Amino acid sequence: MRLRTFGAALLLAGVCALSAALPAAADTSSPDGKWRVYHPQSGQPHMIVEIEQTDGTLEGHIVELADGPKDAVCWSCSGDNHNKPLAGMKIIWDAKWDGKGWSGGSLLRPATGMVSPAYFELVPGGKALQMVTGRGPLRVSQKWERVE
């Protein structure tokens, strides 16, 4: 009887140790976290954006550039962002939950310096985020991939 209790305790301790060693899984019901963005023309990884919900709105910053120089600046941006480093730059703001996704927000497109209206919706399962920005022929739709 003692051996069985010891074996169960040992098994439980092993499961606890293993679960503590594994990284925490991302919350797939929320857009919070890091997302890999692909270049719209080439389809190659372009940057990593970290999104957080603050006061009911989405806010996103560039964390890392996947291509080009790591110290690249936004030469096409105007105002306060002109010639500022892309890494750390806020590119998503004011998107609010509308019952299906996050709308009414803005997205800074660093390649052009343009700010466009943006819509974000989690793909079922939460492993991807559908982003739509722009209007008419300048409309861009991308699927961003969750980075774990």
Image (cartoon, rainbow, N blue to C red):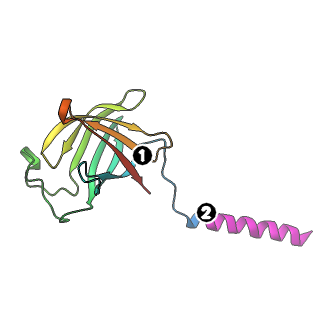
Q: Please, which residue is most extreme toward the top here?
A: 99
Residue drawn at x 22%, y 35% as measured from the top left: 139
Q: Please, which residue is most extreme toward the bottom here?
A: 3
Looking at the rendered structure, the number of numbered marks drawn on it comes to: 2
Q: Considering only order in the chain, which callout, 1 or 2, is on the residue closer to the N terminus? A: 2
Locate residue 2 relative to residue 145 in the image: left or right: right
Whether residue 138 is in magenta: the answer is no
Q: Nearer the viewer, mark 2 or mark 1?
A: 1
Within-10-Å neighbours for mark 1: few <14, some 14–19, many 20+: many
Residue drawn at x 18%, y 33% as measured from the top left: 137
Q: Where residue 17 sits in the image (x, y, percent)?
A: 63, 68
Who is closer to the viewer here, 8 or 99?
99
Locate residue 23 relative to residue 40 in the image: left or right: right
Main SS of the magenta part reads helix
- State the residue position of label 2: 19
Instruction: Give the residue type that dot 1 points to.
Output: Ala
| Secondary-structure class at tag 1 | strand
Instruction: Give the residue type that dot 2 points to.
Output: Ser
* Quadrant housing the N terminus: bottom right
Q: Where residue 98 sits in the image (x, y, percent)?
A: 38, 27
Q: Please, which residue is most extreme toward the right here?
A: 1
- In the picture, the disc for residue 128 is 1
Q: Which region shows up in magenta? A: 1-19
Whether residue 12 is in magenta: the answer is yes
Who is closer to the viewer here, 135 or 33?
135
Q: Where residue 129 sits in the image (x, y, percent)?
A: 39, 43
